Image (cartoon, grey):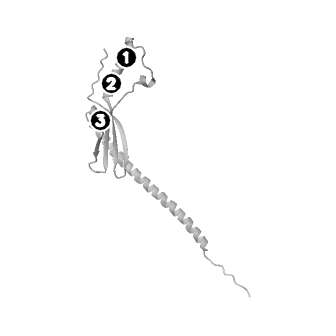
Amino acid sequence: MKQHVKHQAGFTILEVLIALTIFAVFASVYSMSQGHNYMSSTILRQDLKLQELCNNKLNEILLNPPVLQDSLTLTEDVKSDENDRNIEYHVKYARFKIPDLNLILGTEDEDNSDTNQAMAKRIGEQIKKNIEDSIWQVQVTVVDKTNNRSLALASWLTNRKAKIKLNVL
């Protein structure tokens, strides 16, 4: 008698487990990458919103600057946004400071007896004072209190009320 051998069609349990493991790995990698893409786009959207708000506030200050005086440098101005209470604006003003290059380089004038050098030094000091009185810096920081993200931009302001003096004699 002839024996008939049955060939079973289908997968063994081991083949099914291997296929499920491969599928699970690919599915988890795909979902993780999609989650990362979603988080990146959410952060980018938040940063773009902060940048737009910061640009708007800085342009508002540049178009209508306050009276630039030393009292502005004492405290940082903090205000909430009119439309969104979770947004805060921090505005800080500072005078422009020109460093003394002689102190930085470690070279001081040893002989100030020459009248030309003395006059040049007085002219330089007066120009430095005029520039420091005329140029100010403003920094605007926008803070989103819901996620503690912030963005800061800075620009230069010109003090239109500053008097340029040149008294060297």
- Residue 33, percent from left and from top: 49, 57
- The numbered disc on residue 120 is 1
The answer to which of 134 and 79 lies nearer the viewer is: 79
Marks counted in the figure total: 3
Q: Residue at x 34, y 45 (%)?
A: 142
Q: How crowded is the residue under tag 1: few (<14 C-alpha within 10 Å), some, or many (20+)?
A: few
User: Is the N terminus in the top left, top right, bottom left or bottom right quadrant?
Assistant: bottom right
User: Is the C terminus in the top left, top right, bottom left or bottom right quadrant?
Assistant: top left
SS category of the residue bearing label 1: helix
Asked if marks 3 and 1 touch (Cβ < 8 Å), the reply is no
- Residue 114, percent from left and from top: 39, 11
Q: How crowded is the residue under tag 3: few (<14 C-alpha within 10 Å), some, or many (20+)?
A: few
- In-image side of 38 versus 8 (left or right): left
Q: Residue at x 37, y 14 (%)?
A: 118
What's the amino acid at mark 2? Answer: Lys
- The numbered disc on residue 74 is 3
Q: Is residue 135 above or below residue 139?
A: above
Q: Residue at x 28, y 37 (%)?
A: 63
Which callout, 3 or 2, points to the residue nearer the camera? 3
The quadrant holding residue 120 is top left
Q: Residue at x 34, y 52 (%)?
A: 146
- Residue 166, percent from left and from top: 30, 19
- The numbered disc on residue 154 is none
Whether residue 68 can be seen here? no
Alpha-carbon span between mark 2 and mark 1 = 14 Å
SS category of the residue bearing label 2: helix
Q: Which residue is mark 2?
A: 129
What's the amino acid at mark 1? Answer: Ala
